Image (cartoon, grey):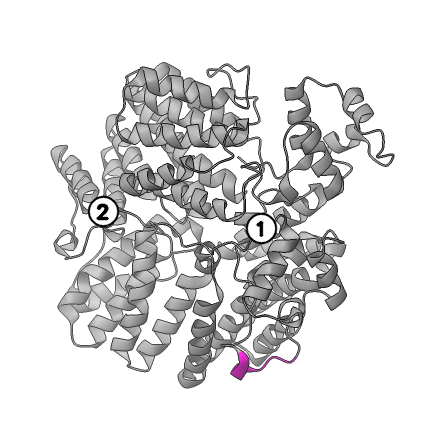
Amino acid sequence: MPVCNSAAWVRELRKRKKWSIARLQFELKNDFNLNIFRIERGTQQPKVVTMQTLGVMMSIPMNDFICPILVGQPANVYTLRYHLSQALQAENIETARELYGELTRLPGFETPINRQFLLSQKAQLDYLLGEPPEPLLKLIREGISQTLHKYDAADINNALLVYEEPILFHTMAKVYLREGDTVTAIRILEGMRESFNKLPINDVERDATLAPILLTLTDALMLDKEYEQAVSICDEGLEVSATRNHGAYTPAFLHNKATCMRRLNQGDSARTFYRLAFFGYELLHKRNKALRVLEEARRYDLTFDTYGVEDLEYTPVTGHVYNRSDMEPCDNIFQLIKNTREKSGLTQEDVYQGICSKSTLSKIENGRMEANHYILEPIFQRLGLDINLYCRFYLGTKNFEIYRERERMHQLLIQKKYDEAEAFLIKLENLNEFRRGTNLQFIIMAKATFHRAHHGLTPNYLRILHDALAITWPDYNEDDISTRRLTHYETILINQIAGYYYLNEKYNDAEKIYNRLMCGFNNQYKDETEKIKLYATMIFNYASCLHELKQYQKSMEILDNGINFDIERERLYQLPQLILVWAYNLFDDNKQKESAPYFVLAYYVLCIFADYGKSTYKILISNHMKEHFNITFE
């Protein structure tokens, strides 16, 4: 588990080393400007070079913050590591076996951190293969002891878990659970939950790791007949899944919550959650799990109308890993930027324009300057890279606070909590970090959103969008969209400009922008984890525009790419909107009967995410189904 706060990182590693603050201060006697006490309180942010020194001194080489999970490995090994982790998460056993075998044949895995990584992958693979508990637990304990020499698995709520420790403890809990020892499993899982909840809310990797832990905890509590507590954990898991995991675990949490409600004799509520779990699994093409939910509901006389959705024909999905770029040979983050830029045939101007000066980028590439996060992030985006895959420890105390504030505003905007967001905006505008560059662009984007909410799609709204875009692209030209390397915010703004034309029924103008945006977008991103942030939204908008132009077949071709991508990667959150456009294409192309189940799917999955900004189209679907199919939803 990466630790984004350097204060917590330094404090935890010092304690593990059994050093006092005075001892660590003495070891760093050559750094006269460093105060360990202030660093551990989060009031002083050390330089990158100091953090490297700290890491080396405490036997934790940082390797310039590029994936500080493996020691001394070339950058391309991280691509292999990433695909192995994805294969295990998708329970793709054969692929995981092959990748694990490939990793074990590589040199340099004798160090504790690297050995722990291999043991963790081996433990997960053996668990999926159903290996006996004793040798598996022995393997897990060996893995944990590589970096955590003294621990109590039943009392880890105060631990700061790093490297592969969270995955190893989670696997340990699952082994105990499978063997019927729910007490030990619950102690471990609740301890991990408490530990994780001490980390910053909305940290991407915190929530990605926490969601499956919460799901396993609900399983354990249900086996222990602690149904009320399990419901509470399900609610927590649903929020984490919706906000940061794109709904990947949502149907499972809904199913568990339905079972708990049934056990608590709350039949009507149980029926509601069985229904939502069923449609969630169906939309993810997990037919076997959907039918299991349906069978359980029927067994306890909690039936609901499925509207024939279970008869739709599709190919079951077993999961698919995100593609990742082949990393250019490099030793640090600065070389990664330079080598990727040159390999992509980009000039420095292609990358720095609107983000920083040419001299600043040159200093960054030569390792002579420590860049702030709001500079590094858009640079990575123009290179088509996901910064989180390469810089897993890149936010210092101050930078992290700025990042967290921006993410909080982002969530308020997504959930359309505009009153709260506008009040929060005043705070952001008073921070120096939000007065320039991409952070200022974010502020102006938020103001455009507020203007639209209060005044609609006025010409002034369009002007604000162009003002925001001018921060990083002052000479914006629609003809250059498909060839220019865009940042995340530039893509959002251009998408919103096209949306302005679309919603004002200037469909041809909108279609030209959407087409150019999609062409450039598909060519730019090497890391699909970066591409996916806006992929489904752009697919939805472009396909909707084509639908209005009565280009139904082309619209469905565009949708097919987006739907399959999200289904294969279990991204439930954006799927109902894509399915809704699919349904309208069928309906308006004289295939009304075929469209009905898709309208139903879209409606009920929108219900799942109603509290997370996804309720807009529910009334539209409800009225449509009543008028054309005489169907009234429960």
Q: Residue at x 34, y 72 (%)?
A: 543
**Callout 2 touching callout 1 (CB < 8 Å):** no
* Residue identified by numbered label 2: 286
Q: Please tell me which residue is depicted at 73% across the width and 55% down the height of the picture.
A: 433
Above or below, 383 relative to 51: below
| Residue range of the region highlighted in magenta in the rendering | 475-480
- Residue 2 lies, in percent from the top left, at 56, 37
Q: Secondary structure at mark 1?
A: helix
Which amino acid, mark 1? Glu
Asked whether residue 620 is in view, the answer is no
> Which residue occupies the foreground of this view, 504 or 496?
496
Q: Is residue 387 left or right of residue 54?
A: left
Q: How far across and how far down the image is residue 274, in percent?
A: 24, 40
What residue does disc 1 label? Answer: 407
Up the image or down, 141 lies above or below 429; here it is: above
The answer to which of 629 and 590 lies nearer the viewer is 590
Is residue 399 toward the left or the right of residue 551 in the image? right
Task: Determine which quarter of the picture holds residue 419.
Answer: bottom right
Residue 265 in picture, x, y percent from top left: 24, 27
Of residues 382 and 588, the one drawn nearer to the viewer in this rendering: 382
On screen, residue 252 versus residue 470, left or right, reads: left
Q: CA distance from mark 2 to mark 1?
A: 32 Å
- For label 2, count other residues whose C-alpha is less than 10 Å away and answer few (under 14), some (14-19) or many (20+): many
Residue 562's spot in the image, x, y percent? Answer: 34, 63
Q: Is residue 283 left or right of residue 311?
A: right
Magenta includes 501? no
Q: Residue at x 64, y 35 (%)?
A: 61
